Image: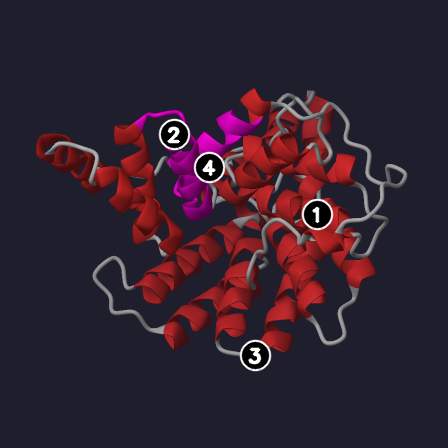
Amino acid sequence: MNDHTWPHRSETSHFSTLLFPIKNPSTKPHNSTSNRICQFKSSSSSDYRDFASLPNDVLTKIAANFSLPNLQTASLVCKSWRDGLRPLREAMLFLRWGKRFKHGRGGVKANLDKALDSFLKGAARGSTLAMVDAGLVYWEMGKKEEGVALYRRAAELGDPAGQCNLGISYLQAEPPNVKEAVKWLYQASVAGYVRGQYQLALCLHRGIGTDQNLSEAARWYLRAADGGYVRAMYNVSLCYSLGKGFVKNHRQARKWMKFAADHGHRKAQLEHGLTLFSEGQMMKAVVYLELAGRGGETAAVHVKNVILQQLSTPSREHALSLADNWRALPSSR
């Protein structure tokens, strides 16, 4: 399930009405799980009795996408909840073992079959987190129908990762179901899931499953970039640079290109390196071009070699040492 980046210019032709309004785009998305738990804990005594009588199947659906810390907090509300949430707490143990088997961590050898078995046991206990991970394993095994079925279960229970993966699955289906794809990507986006925001922006940018709308696409790119999604950082820079969805702004374009480069985006490292070269900042240019070249951007290698010929031996060694010790800033991929 590969992400794409900036659409080809032939894929963008006209503006249209705003189909997906964003409320308070500068405000970071709230954590609905935490809010629900806070509401539970601040209830009156009469409300408390109502919560205690909540049927277990309803409680399990409400808490289906809770992480272990949130489950532990919710289990403190009352004995009824502690008992009702036991299957989901057990699911977290299977989820942990599944990740160990999938990645070969915690003293166990990587074993995809055992990972899948653990994830499915967690999914059977109602955890959407386990459903999504089981779906990913099925997808990697080439069993896409089984994977999509689990994504759908998680998505219908309100899991943003499940909604995003289901939307991408619809885009990659033969034939694609673009209307359903956009519907689920939008739900993941408004929940604050940055990969969903980026994918929705691509759909709006290209006019896939909705009218093409560069202004809304740029705003969703920016939401995803603010959330740490590196591909979105790069596309935000292009939006400002080309005046696509935003008014042209060289300072913002440069800022976001550097952000993307510092978070490990290879094309951004190439372009930022070229910008530094044009400004005469040779040492910094070498570092970014070296990083881009190591990442497969062959055009960066030629320019870097030209610059190196102009530097003294100590300067060359220092620049390459900086590249050797460089580490990408953390991101949400």
Tag 1: amino acid: Leu
Q: CA distance from mark 2 to mark 3?
A: 47 Å
Element type at mark 1? helix
Name the disc covering residue 143, or none: 3
User: Where 235 falls versus 177 (above or below)?
Assistant: above
Residue 197 lies in magenta, yes or no?
no
Decide which of tag 4 and tag 3 comes sooner along the chain.
Answer: 3
Q: Residue at x 73, y 25 (%)?
A: 46
Tag 2: amino acid: Leu
Q: Is residue 180 left or right of residue 310?
A: right
Q: Position of residue 53 (x, y in %)?
A: 70, 41
Q: Which residues are magenta?
A: 253-281
Tag 3: amino acid: Lys
Q: Is residue 272 left or right of residue 302?
A: right
Q: CA distance from mark 2 to mark 1?
A: 32 Å
Q: Residue at x 64, y 57 (%)?
A: 154
Element type at mark 3? loop
Mark 1, mark 3: which one is toward the viewer? 1
Q: Residue at x 28, y 37 (%)?
A: 286
- Tell which residue pokes out farthest to the left in this image: 314
Is residue 175 something one can see in this rendering? yes
Which residue is under mark 2? 276
Q: CA distance from mark 1 to mark 4?
A: 19 Å
Mark 2, mark 1: which one is toward the viewer? 2
Asked if the residue at tag 3 contacts the one at tag 4, i.e. Cβ–Cβ closer than 8 Å, the answer is no
